[in-house]
Amino acid sequence: QVQLVESGGGLVQGGGSLRLSCKASGSIIRVNRMAWYRQAPRKERELVAVISSLGNTNYADSVKGRFTISRDYAKITVYLQMNSLKPEDTAVYYCNSFMYVAGQGPRDYWGQGTQVTVSS
């Protein structure tokens, strides 16, 4: 069974920083992209940042210059360093990865989500 387990969420004051981590485990053959999404109350889930298997990155305009996505290939872990946090960054953050898993076709996998709350 494949799992994506997030950690690092919490409550932080505006202007502060948090670092999210997401580790993949299971019968993983290959990991393609890894990404972070977020969903605020009463809003659609949105892409925050994505990193390809080659290390190329893309960010939502709202987080450019403040957030940094990175990955550790050996640990099959993706990180999201969030600086200069704003109240509008408050959301549940979800880890996502497109992976090739033994006995299954390649597809997207999701973590359970971690809450990030930024106070003003």
Image (cartoon, rainbow, N blue to C red):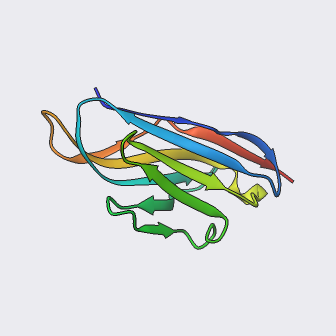
In the figure, is residue 58 to the left or right of 114? left
- The C terminus - image quarter: bottom right
Instruction: Residue 17: give x, y in percent of width and height.
Output: 74, 51
Judging depth in this view, the residue of 81 and 117 nearest the camera is 81
Judging depth in this view, the residue of 89 and 75 nearest the camera is 75
In the figure, is residue 92 to the left or right of 96? right
Judging depth in this view, the residue of 33 and 116 nearest the camera is 33
- The residue furthest top is 1
- The residue furthest left is 103
In the image, residue 87 sits, relative to residue 101, either above or below, namely below
Instruction: Residue 85: give x, y in percent of width and height.
Output: 75, 57
In the figure, is residue 23 to the left or right of 31? right
Identified at 42% across, 60% down, the residue is: 51
- The residue furthest bottom is 61
- The N terminus - image quarter: top left
In the image, residue 56 sits, relative to residue 22, either above or below, namely below
In the image, residue 88 sits, relative to residue 11, either above or below, namely below
Q: Find residue 110 and report its image quarter.
A: top left
In the figure, is residue 27 to the left or right of 65? left
Instruction: Residue 67: give x, y in percent of width and height.
Output: 62, 61
Instruction: Residue 48: give x, y in percent of width and height.
Output: 53, 60
Identified at 69% across, 56% down, the residue is: 89
Identified at 12% across, 33% down, the residue is: 103
Identified at 77% across, 49% down, the residue is: 118
